[in-house]
Image: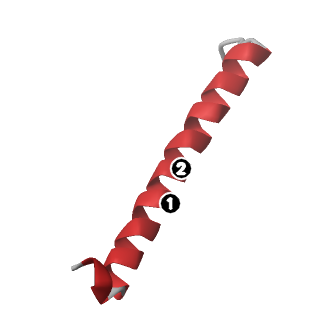
Amino acid sequence: MSIVSPIEYTIQQKRGNYVDNLMIASQLWLHILLISPNFH
């Protein structure tokens, strides 16, 4: 096991959360675009 400093750990956690939020946001946008015919 490698010892990770709290700062590096929080940075990794925030990066993971950012990626998750990006995926969720993109899925939401795809959902909205597919549902509403106004955008087409």
- Identify the residue under disc 1: 24
Residue 10: x %, y % from top left: 72, 25
Residue at point 30%, 84% (across, down)? 38
Which residue appears farthest toward the front when viewing the image? 38
Q: Which mark is residue 7?
A: none
Q: Residues within 10 Å of mark 2 (few under 14, many from 20)?
A: few
Give the side of residue 27 with respect to residue 10, left or right: left
Determine which quarter of the picture holds residue 15: top right
Quarter of the image that includes the N terminus: top right
Residue at disc 1, secondary structure? helix
Q: Residues within 10 Å of mark 1 (few under 14, many from 20)?
A: few
Which residue appears farthest toward the left when viewing the image? 40
Disc 2 to disc 1: CB gap under 8 Å = yes
The three-letter code of the residue at mark 1 reads Ile
Give the side of residue 16 with respect to residue 37, left or right: right
Residue at point 46%, 69% (across, down)? 28
Residue at point 67%, 16% (across, down)? 8
Residue at point 61%, 27% (across, down)? 12
Determine which quarter of the picture holds residue 36: bottom left
